[in-house]
């Protein structure tokens, strides 16, 4: 299964740039001996962030550029005016067959637009979607779309389901992934016209469709793949993150209310630590832009080293199985739009 | 401000019925001396659940009916075939001026449909919405719509904002409540056509509109009122509940992993207890069906006593300020559709 593989990294993307992305790349190289990387960004910055051990490694190639896409850049600027941005050059490595995947913590809209422009979607796939793993009580599920498509059709949602199913099959080894469609109730009469139409398409598909699903059951682990449009998915994701932060803040506030509680809180450290290890957003960092002819993984802009390493790991796993080819074979082919 | 007020209670609604709703009513009566109640449901069941102290109280009137709306009943059955259901008779008490508010833990779709049929919306209000308080880092906000309207227009969302603003003004005493519109980013270019149109209507309104808001900022307490359509609102709510349960489950699981941790977990009891007190869904139980000519409060179907008491408290507070009249005066009047 393991192949020689090269990851292109947009070193400049995200809130912290090279000081976070470069050390994360070094850690990935330590973990996986067969990995090569192409770091795209400011050469001097990259050099200053590389540790001595890796400075002259043959496993790291640097492509120098001073141009970068900023988080506030409109998509049009990234697309038309920044043709030598670190983001774009990194994506072009995949297009040119020099890398099997690209990872960037740059602005999501720009990354999607430039990737789509440079790499194109698979024949038969109408729209790429943003897919990410989400923690559940029993492990994790894959959810898509998380924000790329605010207006979709039932056919597009069916394709998202097919792509999600392929990802769960090949990344998690689940033979017949359970597919759920997000709705506001689980009875047939619930939902709007789009949802009802998608429900029928999914029922008539070859997928292992389990029907409508609500957020509480998503976190109970009732589905392996959860499908929704990008508006709903993004809102659900942001609310989920918001609640997790709120609970963490409330726990901290409860601990701070007295000396006794501070001591108890300190003693309970292994419990917090275990909770953190399991719920840490870093473990779920790395959303895939599925449906493109190459692997593009988006890291959270505010990712730290551990978090960016996780995104690199997602790209690595997808590259190992050659995810775009599998998606093209199994998802794109099934639908004629 | 405090007036004599009577609450009608659908005793049979919810997963547990009278054994939960009747004791909760008794607790409300202890808390508020000026409250009277009309309990609608099976007389024998009510009698068996009433404690001796309240059995012959003049503050409790019972309306007997054996018919009830079940959670699996379609809206059409509740509306057309169950004209003597405890839910409907309770709502009719409000229509007939015998009660100032009604509380039910019955099925949401049926409660909304029957309430709308019996009470009607205010003149000038096109659609009722489901509004509930949500916890934030700084207190709480009000969010609507949480599931009544899956297809809306920009004008309807504007009305939701106006109703939410009135609720925050009169329940929380906030002079100019900050109104946020749920979107998948905070820049002007984000969102679909409906959201962009609503954004313009809100900017041109007299409301204290703060612009687009994402879930993470909702929980940071950046808005007093959060507006969205019922599909998005319901999904956001269910995901939020799901994450909260997941975290609670993970904390319990972390504590169970060893004897030492169990002891630490037990010692940290005051911390859990404080967290529970603040984050307990019971504290937020009781969603208002705003926009109707009377006060209707929906309790969670699975509510226990404390939780149902909270829903009764929501009805009590709205009745105190005569919320429907205020909404009619301030929200309905501002919009001509």
Image (spheres, coloured by chain):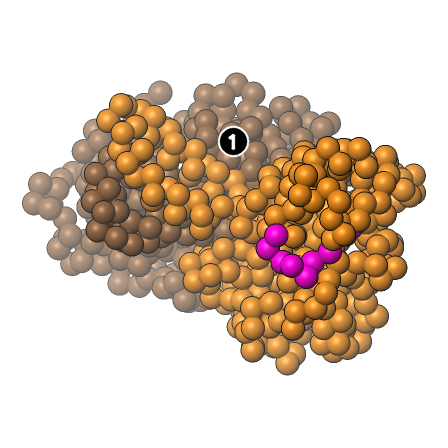
Chain colours: A brown, B orange
In this view, the residue farthest toward the top is A175
Q: From which residue to which does the magenta span run?
A: B30-38
Vertical comparison of B86 with A10: above or below:
above
Asked whether A119 or A18 is in front, the reply is: A18
Image coords of residue B258 (percent x, y): 28, 23
Question: To which chain does the residue with label 1 belong?
Answer: A
User: Circle 1 is placed at which residue position?
Assistant: A220
Image coords of residue A63 (percent x, y): 25, 52
Q: Quadrant of residue B317?
A: bottom right
Identify the residue at image location x=44%, y=51%. Answer: B278
Left or right: B284 with respect to A45? Answer: right
Left or right: A298 with respect to B267? Answer: right
Q: Residues within 10 Å of mark 1 (few under 14, many from 20)?
A: some
Image coords of residue A37 (percent x, y): 25, 41
Left or right: B105 with respect to A237? Answer: right
Image coords of residue A318 (percent x, y): 40, 32
Q: Is residue A171 visible?
A: yes
Vertical comparison of B226 with A232: above or below:
below
Question: Of helix, strand and loop, which one carries label 1?
Answer: loop
Is residue B25 magenta-colored? no
Q: Quadrant of residue B94?
A: bottom right
Q: Quadrant of residue B165?
A: bottom right
Asked whether A23 or A137 is in front, the reply is: A137
Q: Is residue A230 visible?
A: no
Instruction: Say which quadrant the C terminus of chain A sits in.
Output: top right
Identify the residue at image location x=92%, y=39%. Answer: B81
Left or right: B229 with respect to A114? Answer: right
Asked whether B201 or B131 is in front, the reply is: B131
Asked whether A244 or A73 is in front, the reply is: A244
Identify the residue at image location x=52%, y=18%. Answer: A175
Instruction: Say which quadrant the N terminus of chain A sits in.
Output: top left
Q: How many marks?
A: 1
């Amino acid at each position: 299964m393991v192949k020689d593989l090269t990851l292109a990294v947009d070193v400049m993307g995200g809130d912290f740039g090279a000081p976070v992305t470069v050390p994360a790349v070094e850690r990935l190289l330590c973990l996986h001996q067969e990995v090569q990387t192409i770091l795209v960004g400011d050469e001097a910055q990259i050099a200053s962030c590389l540790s001595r051990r890796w400075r002259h490694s043959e496993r790291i190639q640097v492509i120098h550029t001073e141009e970068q896409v900023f988080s506030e850049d409109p998509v049009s600027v990234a697309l038309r005016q920044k043709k030598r941005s670190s983001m774009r050059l990194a994506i072009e490595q995949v297009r040119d067959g020099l890398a099997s995947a690209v990872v960037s913590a740059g602005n999501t809209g720009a990354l999607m637009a430039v990737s789509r422009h440079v790499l194109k979607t698979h024949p038969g796939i109408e729209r790429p979607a943003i897919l990410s793993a989400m923690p559940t009580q029993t492990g994790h599920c894959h959810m898509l779309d998380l924000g790329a498509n605010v207006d979709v059709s039932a056919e597009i949602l069916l394709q998202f389901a097919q792509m999600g199913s392929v990802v769960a099959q090949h990344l998690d080894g689940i033979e017949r992934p359970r597919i759920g469609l997000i709705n506001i109730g689980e009875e047939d009469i619930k939902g709007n016209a789009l949802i009802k139409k998608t429900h029928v398409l999914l029922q008539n598909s070859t997928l292992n469709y389990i029907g409508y699903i609500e957020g509480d059951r998503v976190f109970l682990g009732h589905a392996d793949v959860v499908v929704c449009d990008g508006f709903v998915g993004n809102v659900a994701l942001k609310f989920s993150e918001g609640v997790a932060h709120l609970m963490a803040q409330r726990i901290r506030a409860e601990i701070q209310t007295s000396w006794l509680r501070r001591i108890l809180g300190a003693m309970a450290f292994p419990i917090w630590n275990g909770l953190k290890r399991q719920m840490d957003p870093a473990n779920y960092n790395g959303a895939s832009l599925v449906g493109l002819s190459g692997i593009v993984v988006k890291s959270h802009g505010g990712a730290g080293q551990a978090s960016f390493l996780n995104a690199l790991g997602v790209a690595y796993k997808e590259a190992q199985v050659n995810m775009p080819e599998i998606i093209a074979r199994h998802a794109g082919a099934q639908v004629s739009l």
